[in-house]
Image (spheres, helix red, strand yellow):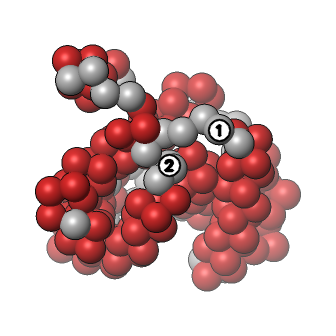
Amino acid sequence: LLLVYSPIFALLMWRQQSLKTCLLRFDKLPYKILLGTGLAVIASFVFLQIRGRAGNCQEFVATLGQGGRVAMLQTFMEGFAVGFLLYRVGAWIGIGWSSVIVAILFMAAHIPNYTSGAFHLSLPVAILMAVAHAGIGVLIFFAAWKSQDIIVISVLHWFINRASDFTTM
Protein backbone atom coordinates (compact mmCIF):
# COMPACT_ATOMS: atom_id res chain seq x y z
CA LEU A 1 0.00 0.00 0.00
CA LEU A 2 2.76 2.43 0.91
CA LEU A 3 4.74 1.49 -2.18
CA VAL A 4 1.80 2.22 -4.49
CA TYR A 5 0.95 5.64 -3.04
CA SER A 6 4.39 6.82 -1.89
CA PRO A 7 5.15 8.65 -5.18
CA ILE A 8 2.27 11.02 -4.41
CA PHE A 9 3.73 11.88 -1.02
CA ALA A 10 7.23 12.16 -2.51
CA LEU A 11 5.98 14.65 -5.10
CA LEU A 12 4.14 16.67 -2.47
CA MET A 13 7.27 16.86 -0.34
CA TRP A 14 9.55 17.61 -3.30
CA ARG A 15 7.31 20.43 -4.54
CA GLN A 16 6.51 21.56 -0.98
CA GLN A 17 2.77 21.30 -1.58
CA SER A 18 0.07 20.77 1.01
CA LEU A 19 -2.55 18.03 1.19
CA LYS A 20 -5.01 20.59 -0.14
CA THR A 21 -3.51 19.99 -3.58
CA CYS A 22 -4.97 16.49 -3.29
CA LEU A 23 -8.37 17.91 -2.30
CA LEU A 24 -7.83 16.82 1.29
CA ARG A 25 -9.04 19.31 3.85
CA PHE A 26 -9.60 18.51 7.51
CA ASP A 27 -11.72 21.53 8.47
CA LYS A 28 -15.27 20.56 9.50
CA LEU A 29 -14.22 16.90 9.53
CA PRO A 30 -17.12 15.59 11.68
CA TYR A 31 -19.62 17.35 9.41
CA LYS A 32 -17.99 15.87 6.28
CA ILE A 33 -18.00 12.37 7.74
CA LEU A 34 -21.65 12.76 8.74
CA LEU A 35 -22.58 14.11 5.29
CA GLY A 36 -20.63 11.31 3.61
CA THR A 37 -22.34 8.73 5.80
CA GLY A 38 -25.78 10.17 5.06
CA LEU A 39 -25.18 10.17 1.31
CA ALA A 40 -23.60 6.72 1.54
CA VAL A 41 -26.61 5.27 3.37
CA ILE A 42 -28.93 6.58 0.65
CA ALA A 43 -26.64 5.44 -2.17
CA SER A 44 -26.16 2.02 -0.57
CA PHE A 45 -29.90 1.54 -0.12
CA VAL A 46 -30.49 2.41 -3.79
CA PHE A 47 -27.66 0.08 -4.80
CA LEU A 48 -29.05 -2.74 -2.66
CA GLN A 49 -32.56 -2.07 -4.01
CA ILE A 50 -31.33 -2.33 -7.61
CA ARG A 51 -29.53 -5.57 -6.77
CA GLY A 52 -32.62 -7.00 -5.05
CA ARG A 53 -31.00 -7.09 -1.59
CA ALA A 54 -32.66 -4.11 0.12
CA GLY A 55 -34.40 -6.44 2.57
CA ASN A 56 -31.00 -7.42 3.94
CA CYS A 57 -29.98 -3.96 5.21
CA GLN A 58 -29.10 -5.19 8.70
CA GLU A 59 -26.83 -7.87 7.26
CA PHE A 60 -25.25 -5.23 5.02
CA VAL A 61 -24.59 -2.88 7.96
CA ALA A 62 -22.85 -5.75 9.76
CA THR A 63 -20.39 -6.03 6.84
CA LEU A 64 -19.23 -2.40 7.01
CA GLY A 65 -16.32 -3.28 9.28
CA GLN A 66 -15.13 -6.18 7.13
CA GLY A 67 -11.69 -5.78 5.69
CA GLY A 68 -10.51 -3.84 8.70
CA ARG A 69 -8.34 -0.77 8.82
CA VAL A 70 -6.12 -1.74 5.91
CA ALA A 71 -9.11 -2.00 3.55
CA MET A 72 -10.44 1.33 4.82
CA LEU A 73 -7.04 2.95 4.36
CA GLN A 74 -6.74 1.50 0.86
CA THR A 75 -10.17 2.89 -0.08
CA PHE A 76 -9.25 6.29 1.35
CA MET A 77 -5.94 6.26 -0.52
CA GLU A 78 -7.79 5.63 -3.78
CA GLY A 79 -9.78 8.80 -3.08
CA PHE A 80 -6.57 10.60 -2.19
CA ALA A 81 -5.04 9.55 -5.53
CA VAL A 82 -8.19 10.73 -7.31
CA GLY A 83 -7.88 14.12 -5.59
CA PHE A 84 -4.21 14.27 -6.55
CA LEU A 85 -5.01 13.61 -10.21
CA LEU A 86 -8.10 15.83 -10.34
CA TYR A 87 -6.19 18.78 -8.95
CA ARG A 88 -3.28 18.45 -11.34
CA VAL A 89 -5.08 17.40 -14.52
CA GLY A 90 -7.86 19.89 -13.77
CA ALA A 91 -5.34 22.74 -13.51
CA TRP A 92 -3.90 21.65 -16.83
CA ILE A 93 -6.98 21.00 -19.00
CA GLY A 94 -9.98 22.05 -16.90
CA ILE A 95 -12.35 20.09 -14.72
CA GLY A 96 -14.64 18.77 -17.46
CA TRP A 97 -12.09 16.63 -19.26
CA SER A 98 -10.17 16.05 -16.05
CA SER A 99 -13.24 14.38 -14.51
CA VAL A 100 -13.60 12.16 -17.58
CA ILE A 101 -9.93 11.15 -17.69
CA VAL A 102 -9.65 10.48 -13.95
CA ALA A 103 -12.94 8.52 -13.94
CA ILE A 104 -11.68 6.34 -16.80
CA LEU A 105 -8.38 5.71 -14.99
CA PHE A 106 -10.17 5.04 -11.71
CA MET A 107 -12.56 2.53 -13.25
CA ALA A 108 -9.83 0.90 -15.37
CA ALA A 109 -8.05 0.15 -12.10
CA HIS A 110 -11.15 -1.77 -11.00
CA ILE A 111 -11.27 -4.07 -14.06
CA PRO A 112 -9.06 -6.74 -12.41
CA ASN A 113 -11.54 -6.87 -9.51
CA TYR A 114 -14.41 -7.25 -11.98
CA THR A 115 -12.72 -10.14 -13.82
CA SER A 116 -11.64 -11.94 -10.66
CA GLY A 117 -12.47 -11.34 -7.04
CA ALA A 118 -16.16 -11.60 -6.28
CA PHE A 119 -17.47 -10.83 -9.78
CA HIS A 120 -15.75 -13.22 -12.22
CA LEU A 121 -16.93 -11.29 -15.29
CA SER A 122 -15.55 -11.78 -18.78
CA LEU A 123 -13.18 -9.03 -19.89
CA PRO A 124 -15.65 -7.45 -22.38
CA VAL A 125 -18.40 -7.36 -19.73
CA ALA A 126 -15.95 -5.99 -17.15
CA ILE A 127 -14.94 -3.22 -19.55
CA LEU A 128 -18.62 -2.33 -20.17
CA MET A 129 -19.23 -2.27 -16.42
CA ALA A 130 -16.20 -0.01 -15.93
CA VAL A 131 -17.45 2.36 -18.65
CA ALA A 132 -20.89 2.56 -17.01
CA HIS A 133 -19.33 3.20 -13.61
CA ALA A 134 -16.97 5.79 -15.10
CA GLY A 135 -20.03 7.82 -16.10
CA ILE A 136 -21.12 7.95 -12.47
CA GLY A 137 -17.52 8.70 -11.50
CA VAL A 138 -17.44 11.78 -13.73
CA LEU A 139 -20.38 13.26 -11.80
CA ILE A 140 -18.90 12.38 -8.42
CA PHE A 141 -15.45 13.71 -9.35
CA PHE A 142 -16.96 16.93 -10.63
CA ALA A 143 -18.70 17.32 -7.27
CA ALA A 144 -15.38 16.61 -5.50
CA TRP A 145 -13.73 19.32 -7.59
CA LYS A 146 -16.48 21.81 -6.75
CA SER A 147 -16.22 21.05 -3.03
CA GLN A 148 -12.41 20.81 -3.20
CA ASP A 149 -12.64 17.88 -0.79
CA ILE A 150 -12.44 14.09 -1.03
CA ILE A 151 -13.54 13.11 2.47
CA VAL A 152 -17.25 12.86 1.63
CA ILE A 153 -16.59 10.77 -1.48
CA SER A 154 -14.15 8.56 0.44
CA VAL A 155 -16.90 7.64 2.91
CA LEU A 156 -19.31 7.08 0.02
CA HIS A 157 -16.71 4.94 -1.76
CA TRP A 158 -16.26 2.73 1.33
CA PHE A 159 -20.00 2.08 1.62
CA ILE A 160 -20.44 1.34 -2.09
CA ASN A 161 -17.46 -1.04 -2.05
CA ARG A 162 -19.03 -2.87 0.87
CA ALA A 163 -22.46 -2.93 -0.85
CA SER A 164 -20.88 -4.26 -4.02
CA ASP A 165 -19.11 -7.03 -2.11
CA PHE A 166 -22.26 -7.75 -0.10
CA THR A 167 -24.42 -8.24 -3.19
CA THR A 168 -21.94 -10.70 -4.71
CA MET A 169 -21.72 -12.91 -1.59
Residue 104 at x, y percent in the picture: 23, 64
> Where residue 27 is drawn, which disc sits there?
1
Task: Name the residue at 20% across, 71% down.
Answer: 97
Pick the quarter of the image with the C terminus: bottom right
Residue assigned mark 2: 150
Disc 1 residue crowd, few under 14, some 14–19, many 20+, Cα 10 Å: few
Q: Is residue 92 left or right of residue 27?
A: left
Res. 166 image quadrant: bottom right
Residue 114 at x, y percent in the picture: 33, 59
> Where residue 64 is drawn, which disc sits there?
none
Res. 103 image quadrant: bottom left
Q: Is residue 149 visible?
A: yes
Pick the quarter of the image with the N terminus: top left
Q: Is residue 122 visible?
A: no
Label 2 to label 1: alpha-carbon separation: 12 Å
What amino acid is at disc 2?
Answer: Ile
